[in-house]
Amino acid sequence: MVRGGRVSGWATGWATGWRTGWVACAAVFLVIGVLTGGGCTKKEAAKGDTYPVGLVFDVGGIGDKSFNDAAYAGLLRARDQLGIRFEYFEPGEGTDREAALRLLASGSSKIILGVGFLFTDDIETVAREYPEKLFACVDYTWTEGKQVPANLVGLKFREEEGSFLVGAIAGLVSQSGTVGFVGGMDIPLIHKFEAGYHAGVLSVRPDAKVIISYAGVTGDAFKNPAKGKELALAQIDAGADVIFHASGSTGLGVFEAVRARNKLAIGVDSDQSAVAPDHCLTSMVKQVDVAVFDAISRARDGTFAGGILSEGLKEGGVDYVFNEGNARWITPPIRARVEALRKEIVEGRVTVSSGR
């Protein structure tokens, strides 16, 4: 383990026996990670006797220019503005999430964050075993009646609301009347993006065609740019001229496709305009960085409360990107139409479905 750094490529079976010698185990597996290509990268963190934070990233890790990078931005902001120190892990294929959470919980970290819905079961288990520590899970999966540990906050977003607005933009900008959606893993969370987008398109263009594709049914579907490009090219061949992706780094392949065919893509989670400046219509942004920062801030200030925290358009948890870079497509009439839809959603006059 490297403080303020990462360890990836662990063997998944090392978790047993950590209670009596986790420092030694960490050192051994750090060496194994380097020797097997997992690698180790040191990152500078705030120094001194500052508030310790631990974070485990989602599949794909730092560099996805989307979900994980947004979480990392929140971590760095907390370092710079709150003076925290941190350590983080990128769990490779994702099979060692629980081991990474346990290692952080057994160390000095006072709050441990898991980034992604895949952490839900693991972080619940570890939170119950470490009641003196605080935990936060981004995109936590919750169902009615489920009991959340008192020391765990589930950070959720109403992605369908932001996706509705970018769907409306796609419907208004499309010249062909056919648009596409590329999802990562075929799961309820990504169905929220799909449902909102589909509804948004049809709200402004009832006769539009929306092509839906998914990259897979496992976590690998969020880190397969080649598959993303393949799916996007197929949609373009079927007439789509605007494609919204909700697929992590798989979406980088979607951007490759629209660049190659001179079409438009809609980014997700973060502003992805830098990926393809002349081909990014907008991005449906989730304030993952703000959620991470706020969770750390509440823990540090003693105002942390467990339970579920859900944010949508009304709370500023989701939105779409509008700036000088995309004003050529989002013209004043389109902007006015989309903002009118926002107002209807915020005021409760329009309810956006969160599923199929």
Image (cartoon, rainbow, N blue to C red):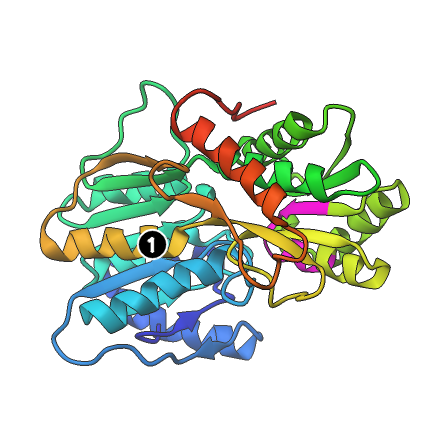
Residue pictured at 11% horizontal, 75% vertical? 49
**Residue at the spot x=90%, y=46% of the render?**
237
Residue at figure coordinates x 47%, y 43% from the top left: 118
Q: Is residue 252 magenta?
A: yes
Residue 187 vs 242, above or below: the answer is above
Q: Compared to 185, does 249 lie above or below?
A: below
Q: Residue at x 69, y 39 (%)?
A: 172
Q: Position of residue 255 (x, y in %)?
A: 71, 59
Which structural element holds mark 1? helix
Q: Quadrant of the C terminus?
A: top right
> Residue 165 at what x, y percent from top left?
56, 38
- Asked where in the image residue 214 lies, by quadrant, the reply is top right
Residue picked out by circle 1? 290
Q: Which residues are magenta?
A: 243-253
Out of 50 and 259, give the one closest to the viewer: 259
Q: Is residue 147 above or below residue 257?
A: above
How busy is the neighbourhood of tag 1: few (under 14 within 10 Å), some, or many (20 plus)?
some
